[in-house]
Image: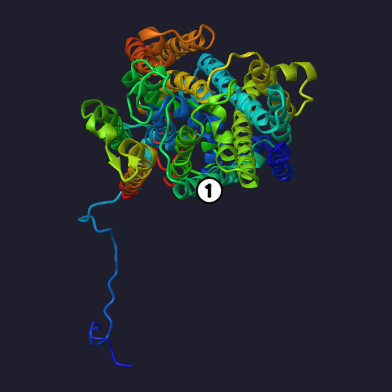
Amino acid sequence: MNTSLGIAAITAVCLVTLTIGALGFRLSRTTTDFYVASRMVTPAWNASAIGGEYLSAASFLGVAGLIYSLGADMLWLPVGYTVGYLVLLLFVAAPLRRSGAYTIPDFAEARMESVTIRRLCSVLVLAIGWLYLLPQFKGAGLALHTVGGTPTWVGNLVVAVVVLINVVAGGMRSITLVQAVQYWIKVTAISVPAFVLLSWWLNHGQPTPQVAALEPGGGWALPLSGFGGVEHPVYAVYSALLALCFGTMGLPHVLVRFYTNPDGQSTRRTTLAVLALLGLFYVFPPLYGAFGRIYLPHLPAGTSPDSITLLLPTAVIPGGVGELLSAILAGGAFAALLSTASGLTICVAGVVDQDLVRGRLRRFTGNDARAVNGFRISAVAAVVVPFVLSLAARDIGLADTVGLAFAIAASTFCPLLVLGIWWRRLSTTGAVAGLITGGLLAMSAVLATVIGGIHGGWTGVLLAQPAAWTVPIAFLVTVLVSLATPSRIPKGTARTMVRLHTPENLVLDRAPR
Amino acid sequence: MPESPSQPPGPQKRVRITSPRTGAPRRGPVRPVTRDIEEQTRLGELYMATLIRAQWRLSVSVLASATMMIGGLPLLFLFVPATRTLNVGPIPLPWLILGVLIYPAVWLAARYYVRQSEQIERDFTELVARR
C-alpha cells in the first residue's frame, strides 16, 4: 500500500479539524459558550453536527468488519443505530431540551431533586464515555497501522493529542462547526470509493460473495443463519436491537448536542434531519462488507476484519486509483474517530469538571481559577484514562465494544429519562434503585465479556448481549420501588412536568421553586 | 355630503347615562389558564395531564407501529424461511430491506410524529390562550 498517500489524507483531516477548531476559539469566551455553544445553532447545522459526532469508528470501520465476518445478521447494527434516534425523538428530545439542563447529571438533579442521583449519573457518564472512547482510539491505531504500517499505539496517541488540543482550545462552539463539517467529510469519504467499487463490480463480471469452507454455518448472506459461529442468532439480533434503540438516548455525547437547539420544536426537527443523514450514511458500510466477501474472502494473517474497508480498494483496483481511494477512506475513518472522540471528551470533561474538579480547584486557589481552567484540566483526565486503557485492553471488535456501551446506557439512563419525563410517580428511591440495578447488571455482563472472554452457549450469549434482560429488569425495579416509596416522590414534580411538556411560546413562569 | 340613513332627521337627541346596565352579566378580571398551570390548581393539573397524555399516546402508538414493522422482520425471516433466500434482481431481499428500504420508512414515521406532536402543542396553546 502506498504509505505516503494515506498518511497525507490522515494528516489533512487532523489539520482541517485543528484549523476549524482554532477559528471557533476566537468566538468562544464564556463557560456557556464552551458547553452549549450559546444555543444559537440552527437545526440544519445541528443535525449535521449530531451526525458528525455520532458516526464513529464503529460505524465507519466496525459495521463493515462485522458484516464481513458474521454475515447478514449484522445488517441490524446500522438499523439499530438509526432507530435509536426515532425512539429518542418519541420520548426524550423535546422535553429534555425544555428541561434546560446541560447534561444527564444536570437533568437527573433537576428532576429528582437529589444530589445522590447526580453523583450516580456522573459515574455512569464516565463509564459509558470511557468505554465508548476506547474503540475510537483503537480504531485510530488500526487505521494508521493499515495505511502507514506504524505500531498501533501511534494512532492512539495522535487521536488523543488532536482531540485534546481541539477541546481544550475551543470547547463546543468550535466542535459544533467541526462536527458538522466532519459529517460531510465522512459521507463523501465512504460514498465515493463505494460508487467506484460498485461500478468496477458491475463492469467486471459481477462475481458473487465467497465463503471459506472451514467457517461454520453456511449462509453468510442469509439472516439468522448463525454464520461465523453465532449461537442463538434470534436472541442476539433482538437483544442487540433493543440495546441500540434504547441506548442511543442515554449516550452522554448525543444528549449534550440536543441542548444546543433553541427550543423543543426545533429539537424535534433537528432529530428528523438526523434520521435522514444517518440513513444516507448507513447505506454504504454493508456494501464494503459484501465487497470484502467478493474480493478478499481470505484476510491476510494477523489482520483485523475491522480493517476490511481500508484494505478493499487496493485489493480490487490495482494501481494509483485503488491507493487514492484507500487514502480517502483512511481520512474518513480518522474524521469519524476524531469527531466522536471530541464529543465524548467534552462530555466526560464536563462531568469531571462539574462534579470532581471545580469544588476542589476552588479550595486550592481560593476562587482565583476561572471556571474554564477547571474544564481544561478535566479534559486531560477525560482523554488520558481511555488512552491508557486502549494500550492495555484485549482485542474485541470496534462495533462490539460500542455495543456494550449502548447496553449500559439502555439499562441505566433509558429508564431514568423515560420514566422521569413521563411518569409523575417516579420516586427518588426508585430512580436510585433502578440506576444501581441496571448499572451493576449491565456492567458485570460487560466485564465478564471483555475480561473473562466470551463463553459459549446461552450464558455467553446472554452476557454478550445483555440488554434484553437488563433493560426490562431496570425498568421493573424503578417502577416497583417507586410505587413502594410514594413519600419520596420529588416535591416539585408537577412544576417540572410543566416545564418539560409545555411549548415555549406559551407565556409561563417555568422557574423551579 | 349626503346624510347617512342611520342618522334620524331632525335635531340630535341627547341621552344621559346615570347608572350601569345592571341587567347585563358582569365580566370579572380575565384569568388565563396559564395562571392555573403556574399555581397548580386542580384545573391547571387537569390541563397538564391532558397534554402529557396526548403526547404519550402519540409516542407509544408510533413506537408500537415501528416495533411491528422493524421488530417483525426477524420473525418473518424465522417463520417464512423463503423470505431469506428471495432475490430482488441481484440483491437478496433481507439485504434490500435492512440495507436500504428501512431508512426512508423510519424517516416517514418520524415525520408523522413531528407533525402530530406539533399539532398537539398548537391545540394546547390555543385552548389555554382562549380564555
Residue A245 versus residue A361 in the image, above or below = below
Relative depth, front residue between B101 and A133: B101
> Residue A127: horizontal and vertical position, in percent?
56, 17
Residue B110 versus residue A412 in the image, above or below = below
Q: How many labels sit on residues? A: 1
Relative depth, front residue between A25 and A486: A25
Picture quarter containing residue A235? Answer: top left
Residue A152 versus residue A480 in the image, above or below = below
Circle 1 Cα neighbour tier, 10 Å, few/some/many (<14 / 14–19 / ≥20): some
Q: Quadrant of the N terminus of chain A?
A: top right
Evaluate whether residue A417 shows in this view: no
Question: Which chain is mark 1 on?
Answer: A
Q: Which residue is mark 1?
A: A196
Relative depth, front residue between B2 and A477: A477
> Residue A322: horizontal and vertical position, in percent?
61, 43
Amino acid type shown at disc 1:
Val
Evaluate whether residue A341 shows in this view: yes
Task: Judge left or right: residue A486 versus residue A189.
Answer: left
Residue B9 versus residue B52 in the image, above or below = below
Task: Judge left or right: residue B19 versus residue A140.
Answer: left
> Residue A22: horizontal and vertical position, in percent?
74, 42
For this orientation, the residue located farthest to the bottom is B1
Picture quarter containing residue A438? Answer: top left
- Residue plotted at (51% across, 6% down): A452
- Residue plotted at (50% across, 9% down): A453
- Residue plotted at (59% across, 45% down): A185
Task: Judge left or right: residue A21 versus residue A190.
Answer: right
> Residue A422: horizontal and vertical position, in percent?
36, 28
Q: Secondary structure at mark 1?
A: helix
Picture quarter containing residue B36? Answer: top left
Relative depth, front residue between A309 and A75: A309
Scheme by which the image is coloured: rainbow
